[in-house]
Amino acid sequence: MRIVGIAGAFRPGAHVRRLLDAVARQLPESAEFEIWDGLERVPPVGNGRLPAEVDELCRVLSAADGLLITAPEHSVLPVQLKHALSWAASPMAGGVLVGKPVAVVTACVRPHEAMWTQVELHWLLGAGGAVVHRADLPVFPAARQFNVIGRLADPVARERAGSALEAVCADVREALKTRAACRFSGLAPLAAPAPIPVDELGTRPAADPGGRPRRAPARARRSGGAELSPQRS
């Protein structure tokens, strides 16, 4: 099971990035977790050839079984996140979001900000055919958000995030089971089409040899050097 994470923030120490790391620790130990951190380089949606940064994103999403997205309140939602999801939902991306389960996790002080963030991201992902599972986590400014090992400190937040992740993982397991059954029976499984190559329609450039996404297995080694195991599902 391969899950790709995208944080709606650019700074490594930003709250939304720490939230992505904390929620990912609740993935099952068998999951392979990968953070795609090329968000800042995504240009606005346009016509013609896919930019190299978008080509990279589409390849990562195509290889993923599910997605985990963490986002801030709507007033500071980075426009690059909207660009990235709009590109991924476009016909030029080759349907990389079709049927893909996605957990969208927000953590906002003001509930209405979380609502607008969830609505907009749900609309963008739904336009590409993704299956969206939402989780809005309560944030109390005076309380600690993360414990000493980087997990969510609030049990209510852990439960809400865990429910969204469980839904994504259940969808992934069902899809993997269906593919295995199709292989066993000799039938071709139903799958999203691959991104469109340049030699067919002239819409995709050669893959960018640099800037590969940072990969991090579910049992990830953090910056402090301590190896932490995600919670078993």
Image (spheres, rainbow, N blue to C red):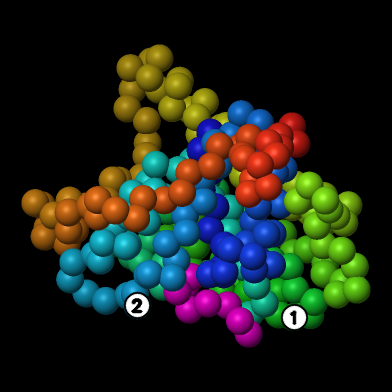
Specify whether 10 is left or right of 86.
right
Quote the CA–CA distance across marks 1 and 2.
Answer: 27 Å
Specify whether 141 is left or right of 33.
right
Question: Residue placed at 64% from the left, 45% from the top?
Answer: 222
The correct choice, above or below, for 76 with respect to 39 in the image is: below
**Residue type for callout 1:** His
Residue under pointer 1: 112
The correct choice, above or below, for 97 with respect to 33 in the image is: below
In the rendered image, residue 54 lying in the magenta stretch gets the answer no
Question: Residue placed at 48% from the left, 78% from the top?
Answer: 79
Chief SS of the magenta region: helix
* Dot label at residue 9: none
Q: What element carries label 1?
A: helix
Specify whether 229 is left or right of 147.
left
Range drawn in magenta: 75-82
The extreme front residue here reads 225
Q: Nearer the viewer, mark 1 or mark 2?
A: 2
Q: For residue 105, what is the image quadrant?
A: bottom right
Q: What element carries label 2?
A: loop
Mark 1 vs 2, N-terminal side: 2
Question: Residue placed at 52% from the left, 26% from the top?
Answer: 177
Specify whether 8 is left or right of 209.
right
Q: Where is residue 98 in the image (x, y as percent from the top left)?
A: 42, 51
**Residue type for callout 2:** Pro
User: Within 10 Å of the Cα at label 1, are there few (<14), some (14-19), or many (20+) other Cα atoms?
Assistant: few
In the rendered image, residue 77 lying in the magenta stretch gets the answer yes
Q: For residue 86, what is the image quadrant?
A: bottom left
User: Within 10 Å of the Cα at label 2, are there few (<14), some (14-19), or many (20+) other Cα atoms?
Assistant: few
Q: Where is residue 208 in the image (x, y as percent from the top left)?
A: 24, 55
Residue 170 in view in this figure: no
- Quarter of the image that includes the C terminus: top right
Residue under pointer 2: 44
